[in-house]
Image: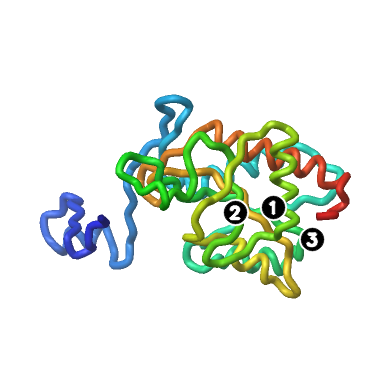
Amino acid sequence: KATKIKDLLIDIGAKDEDDAKRHVSLGDYVCFDSAFAAFGDKLIKGKALDDRVGCAILMALAQKRYPHDVYFVFTTQEEVGCRGAATAAYSIMPDAAIVVESTTCSDVPGSDDAGFSTKLRSGAALSVLDRGSYSDKGLRSLLSEIAKRHGIQHQYKQTTMGGNDASVIHLTQTGVRTAVVSVPCRYIHSPSSVASLDDIEACRCLLEKFLEEEAEEKWHF
């Protein structure tokens, strides 16, 4: 359980209130000093893997050229209203959108099997719906077909909890076909989240094949 704010204390070494005010101001924020590290069987841990892994995947995809226009958008303030995605979607007005994010993964001892959202080392997670959006059926099916065709490990997100930038993108103007591809992430939103390099690679590979092959499909979802 999260500790209540009134029970938290940060000791900065000040000798009194006046000394403390010389170093910090009302409204300053802090974070845990959690270093990135690789450990175990191809796992990584670090803070803000939601959505640093999404950024890493987009950066890798952006290294290649595609026979059509692709906008790689790095949004802000997803957790407080998807504000960056809203303005970006209105600016670009894409034919289709793929949201690349991290999602909850509760496959640890003591968890209820029925509450599993995704499982680590089970590949890219495709969403059907969540609290904010309903993924385009044709686009989601195409992603699944591409994964099967190329032997890319994938799974379906098994709960409808949470939300992401798709919630505002798919409602832009007259609507945008939108799907979500997620990386399972244990202890999400904590100072030390955990993700699998294999799951990250599965997401990258799936999206790369989609970008290479969707031009041939001519957006016939």
Give coordinates of residue 208: x percent, y percent: 72, 39
Query: Which residue is depicted at the point 74% across and 43% down?
Result: 145
Q: Is residue 12 left or right of residue 220?
A: left
- Residue in the foreground of this view, choosing between 209 and 37: 209
Pointers 2 and 3 in contact (C-beta within 8 Å): no
Question: Mark 3 — residue?
Answer: 95
Q: Residue at x 33, y 61 (%)?
A: 28
Q: Which mark is residue 140?
A: 1
Q: Secondary structure at mark 2?
A: loop
Q: Is residue 7 above or below residue 211?
A: below
Q: Which residue is mark 2?
A: 127
Please tell me whether mark 1 sits on a helix, a strand or a loop. helix
What amino acid type should be assigned to the residue bearing mark 3?
Asp
Classify the position of the N terminus by image quarter.
Answer: bottom left
Q: Residue at x 29, y 64 (%)?
A: 25
Q: List x then y, in percent, for residue 152.
A: 66, 34
Say if 18 sits above or below 111 in the image: below
Marked residue nearer the N-terminal end (3 or 1): 3
| Dot 2 or dot 3, earlier in sequence | 3
Q: Residues within 10 Å of mark 2 (few under 14, many from 20)?
A: many
In the displayed structure, would residue 43 be above or below residue 156?
A: above
| Quadrant position of residue 129 | bottom right
Q: Residues within 10 Å of mark 3 (few under 14, many from 20)?
A: few
